[in-house]
Amino acid sequence: MIGFLLFLVALAVFLLTLFLALEIVASFIAAKPPGVPTAGRGRIAVVIPAHNEREGVAATVTAARAALSEGDRVVVVADNCNDGTAAAAAEAGAEAIERRDDARRGKGYALQFGVDHLRSDPPETVVFIDADCKPAAGAIERVAARANYLKRPVQALYLMSAPQGAGSRSAVSAFAWLIMNRVRMSGLQQLFGVTRLTGSGMAFPWDLIGKTDLASGEIVEDLALTIRMIEAGAPPFLDLGAVVTSELARSQSGATTQRARWERGSLAIAARKVTGLFRKAAGGDIRSFAMGLDLLLPPLTLFALLIAALLALSLAAASFGYGGALSLTILSATIFTLCIAFAWAAYGRETLPASALLGIIPYLLGKARVYGGEGRRSAERWTRTDRGDGG
């Protein structure tokens, strides 16, 4: 019985590894879509949710305003702030509105507050940008025009960089982010015409976002919103030609907070939502099926640890005569390693230089903090990440 159960686990891991490989291979043929004419894009409103972001919000507002035209708006939602975020945003030229509600905390509530603020004079398109992000030139107008044209959400390519001098562990984290947002998501779209919303650089036509209830305390509200859009028949679209960037936390506590929100939150959403996606897929919705499989894929380093642990268990079981799982696990480990190596060679050498590859070891050891008590507390609420910047 033990050998059979181990074989079933090995089979499940093998199938997920094949799906990951499929996404990575498909990413090699994914191309930037042609631009959409912006002449008829209509008015754009950029909504920036911010929780104690006084130090960085002005730069984000300035970058957003530089991309806009007369009639467009930049709205900063200072959510439960106590550091002067609203004043800094207003000084930079944004419409700064303040929300105070200690009982209902979460980025989703801030997004809803911003959308509600727009209802009296709604734009054609709403673009959400995090307060610590910088849109590349033309990114906001590009995703807004495409969202207005497709009548579905459009996600810019959202990338993270390691702070200068932060060490190899941050470079590994930035590479893991690149694999998710650039490699896997472009492959998923190439294959199935769907992607994940990743939290910043998201554009929505008003007719869609204006009737969507965003108010929630979900820590990974972007993933929950992705599923809701798919269920509503408006699967998100990834535009590789539009880029928004942010910087990883410099401090260890900040890095733990960030990874805990992303990883623990994603796993929690997957546990709750994957069954519903597969139920919808049973009716013939291939995009729901694809997103369900994608949700089942653990975060990159957790998946690597899972395969390593399964390999150790399979070797131990084989020594007692239960060798059925071993060959599948070895095959999974081989496929996983080769695919990540190819992805690194194609996309990741600048993000994760060869000299920083040894940072994988302390990064893996740091998973104990992410999945321990400190990470659990971070994943339960929306708090400003301690970036070690004095903010």
Image: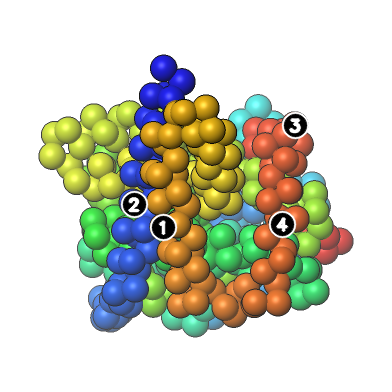
**Inter-mark Cα distance, 4 to 1:** 20 Å
Residue depicted at 29% across the width and 55% down the height: 194
Residue depicted at 39% across the width and 34% down the height: 324
**Inter-mark Cα distance, 1 to 3:** 33 Å
Dot 4 crowding, Cα within 10 Å, few <14, some 14–19, many 20+: few
**Inter-mark Cα distance, 3 to 4:** 21 Å
Number of labels in the image equals 4
**Inter-mark Cα distance, 1 to 2:** 8 Å
- Does the CB distance between marks 1 and 2 fall below 8 Å? yes
Q: Point out the tag, 2 or 4, that comes first from the N-terminus.
A: 2
Nearest the viewer among 375 and 357 is 357
Nearest the viewer among 373 and 66 is 373
> What kind of residue is marked 1?
Ile
The residue at which mark 1 appears reads as: 335
Dot 3 crowding, Cα within 10 Å, few <14, some 14–19, many 20+: few
The residue at which mark 4 appears reads as: 361
Q: Point out the tag, 3 or 4, that comes first from the N-terminus.
A: 4
> What kind of residue is marked 2?
Leu
**Residue 305 seen by the camera:** yes
> What kind of residue is marked 3?
Gly
